[in-house]
Image: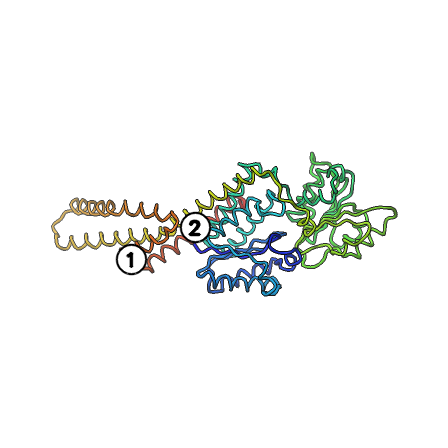
Amino acid sequence: MSLLVIGLSHRSAPVSVLDRASLSPDSRIKLLQDVLAAEPATEAAVLTTCNRVELYADVDKFHAGVAELSTLLARHSGVGLDELTPYLYVHYEDRAVHHLFTVACGLDSMVVGEGQILGQIKDTLASGQELHTAGRLLNDLFQQALRVGKRAHSETGIDRAGQSLVTFGLEQLAAGANVDTWAGGRRALVIGAGSMSSLAAATLARAGVAEIVVANRTASRAERLVAILNEPGGTGVRARAVDMGAVDAELTRADIVVSCTGATGLVLTADAVEAAVGSVPGDREIALLDLAMPRDIDAAVHRLGGARLIDIESLADASADAPMAADVDQVKRIVADEVAAFGAAQRAAHITPTVVALRAMAADVVTNEITRLEGRLPGLDERQRAEITQTVRRVVDKLLHAPTVRVKQLAGEPGGAGYADALRELFDLDPQTVAAVSRADRSEAGDRNAVDLRNRGRV
């Protein structure tokens, strides 16, 4: 395993740099294609959230991999390499596994313990499989990360320690007041209809807002979210969908605005917000929550009277890593155990093609010797030939059983990768045969993981 991760997050870079380094869907696809075209990488996946951009790859050479992948990340993010490099972190092999498992558990999130990262990891895995950029290593890694994250949330109280970014943002807007009390009876405008916007709409509905207006570039997605909000027996909130052209008009009637789109430019300008504030006499204030990266709402809104803006940068300043220490410690122990188990499984899997090639070579030797024996003893009847063949095969199997079982056990231990090399050297195994077994194994594993992902409804 030669797993490499290069990235930047709210822990390593200012939000202004993260904002500029965010990748559009098209940029992510082109980045993955270029990574695979580069010599050091054989697999790749990109994990992006509102506060991180990370590139995972299986590389042949560490230093060449770091140099090439950093250059490609800078090129596709649009941030110069010299400017980007001071904010990049690099993790390799077990440290890279540890990093992803920590991310999956919510320990590296802006709001510690939040569970939304699992959905983003699922999307990363699905994208890698659909684009055929994730092979056996990354399929195994991201599938295991999802299981580790779910285990952390089910076996510990980390959910009590953290909250969703949406809830945290609304609490910041409420400025210390109870969110339900603060939001009750107000009108809300939700811009976007993706997972984060849908969560925001559901949270606002539970908080008791009087009306939710959903605006989205794709009308069908907005209407689908509205239909869910309007379902009989739900929260009772009034919900309706509008197109993006109606946002400015709806802004004049909204008390709360939540925006999280994939737009590359501003969705709400300071002029539009100022006009909306000025359109209603009195001391009306519009509360705006921008969860997009890059930002949807002009940062100049911070300077406007009558408007209160909370964005990713504000949340980064306000977030505090003070969850329940016992829960965090328990999650850290889970991560450490799972990293050790994953490393052992990968090391054991590394020797499997060598063991398979050894047994195939032994089978060929038995076949050739039985054929030679039949030529020297043509008088053997069918029963005698079968008995001799079975005896020879049994002898070979017994001789190979103990060493192959033991070498798999040893390979699972730290430093065990050298046992595969020793086995190939001792038995003079053809490297091309071992490589062919390994390629077939990776292909089968990729197909199996893809089917498993579909059957689980993308896990």
Mark linked to residue 271: none
Q: Mark number for residue 445?
A: 2
- In this view, the residue in front, 4 or 230, is 4
User: How far is mark 2 from mark 1, CA to CA?
Assistant: 27 Å
Q: Amino acid at mark 1?
A: Glu
Q: Seen in the image, is 5 located left or right of residue 383?
A: right
x 44%, y 61%: residue: 61
Q: Is residue 132 visible?
A: no
Percent x, y for residue 151?
Answer: 52, 39
Residue reaching furthest to the top = 233
Viewer-side residue, 227 vs 73: 73
Label placed on residue 425 = 1
Q: How many marks can you see? A: 2
Residue at x 59% of width, y 42% of height: 113
Q: Earlier in the sequence, mark 2 or mark 1?
A: 1
x, y percent for residue 91: 50, 54
Q: Secondary structure at mark 1?
A: helix
Pair 2/1: label in front: 1
> What's the amino acid at mark 2?
Ala
How would you rate the neighbour count of disc 2 (Cα within 10 Å): few for under 14, some for 14-19, many for 20 or more? some
**Which quadrant holds the N terminus?**
bottom left
